[in-house]
Image (spheres, rainbow, N blue to C red):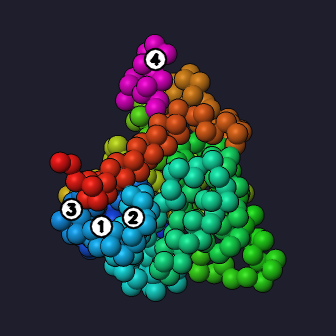
Amino acid sequence: MTDSRPLNTMVENTPTVLWNDSSDPEELRESISYGAVGATCNPVIALAAIKADLPRWSARIAELAQEMPTAGESEIGWKVVEEVSIDAAKLLMPAFEKYKGVNGRLSMQTDPRFHRDAKALADQAEHFSGLAPNIIVKIPATATGIEAIEDATYRGVSINVTVSFTVAQAVAAGEAIERGLKRREAEGLPIDEMGPVVTIMCGRLDDWMKVCYNAGGFCFDPGYLEWAGVAAFKEAYRIFGERGLRARLLSAAYRNALQWTEFVGGKVVLSPPFAWQKRFQDSGIEPTPRMDVPVDPEILEALETIPEFHQAYDVDGMTPEEFIDFGATRKTLRQFLQADADLDALVRDTLVPAP
């Protein structure tokens, strides 16, 4: 008989973990009832959470302007993001204590404007990590980010790698985390309660493959494009196991149910947006372990005709210096930078209202 609570069944009966891809407190509370033991935030999500409770946060912005009389709109905006994140982190403390730091974490993302400065990324990651005991910090999987990921991990920061879409990015980031962990171990520093994860934004890879499919004039079953992110995630999972990388993979940016059902049974984190969680929870689908089931070779063969998919699927498909030029990376970084600008504008409207 199919369970009426598929997500609860998954987290109770498999090693697959559920996080909520939102820091909105009401959504997070319900997600926790589904078995979620973590949550993520980024500039887009933070802006949405602030807008969802705008009267409260507009009043807080005004208070911060009084408390920080020389602060600019960006500094005030990021202070609000910190407070949004700290509020959400409190809801996850029971899971953090239960899982001894491996789960129960709230992701905060580093300022996307620092994406060219490894030290600034690592310094901000360390700062965010100190805001609450259960903060995990997002750093992008670019060449600069890979450097910052190793440095921040060595400093004791639990990292959630973001702006990551390909096997090459995930493995490079996983190996950077591994180097940071080994440096700590060599100096007798603790790692037992660190909980690093490496995200692959599966749906955003699918989105980019659809752009490439149309631009390149390809002609095969368009349904195969829904498998691109799934294929990359499964391949990265295989390589992580083969190389003994200790960070867990995290699936994000959901576009279809395959990005849930195909990963059940893996020692991975699934982080769907709340709306997708509700669809999964109401689906009646029985979550059967499929993480180790390979993608149909016919689908892979068709996808491999797209050069950008080969680049995304092959662990040697890109060097770290090339990560920044991958289409999905550029598109996502621009979106995060725009969300940061939109947050500045929201603060500006409170500090200097239009006449």
- Residue at numbered disc 3: 54
**Disc 4 crowd, CA 10 A, few/some/many (<14, 14-19, 20+):** few
Mark 3–mark 4 Cα distance, whole angstroms, equals 40 Å
Which is nearer the N-term, disc 1 or disc 2?
1
Q: Which residues are magenta?
A: 208-224
Residue 320 at x, y = what percent?
Answer: 69, 43
Q: Is residue 209 left or right of residue 139?
A: left
Badge nearest the viewer, 2 or 4: 2
Q: Quadrant of residue 58?
A: bottom left
- Three-letter code for the amino acid on which mark 2 is drawn: Ile
Marks 3 and 4 in Cβ contact (< 8 Å): no
Q: CA distance from mark 3 to mark 2?
A: 15 Å
Amino acid bearing label 1: Ile
Q: Are marks 2 and 4 in contact (CB under 8 Å)?
A: no
First reached walking from the N terminus: tag 3 or tag 1: 3
Label ID, residue 61: 1
Residue at figure coordinates x 44%, y 47% from the top left = 336
Give the amino acid type for the residue marked by disc 4 in the picture: Ala
Q: Which residue in the structure is indicated by mark 2?
A: 76
Viewer-nearest residue: 294 or 355? 355
Is tag 2's residue or tag 4's residue first in the polypeptide sequence? 2
Residue under the point 45% across and 22% down: 213
Q: SS at mark 3?
A: helix
For marks 3 and 1, give the one nearer the viewer. 1
Callout 1 touching callout 2 (CB < 8 Å):
yes
Of helix, strand and loop, which one carries label 1?
A: helix
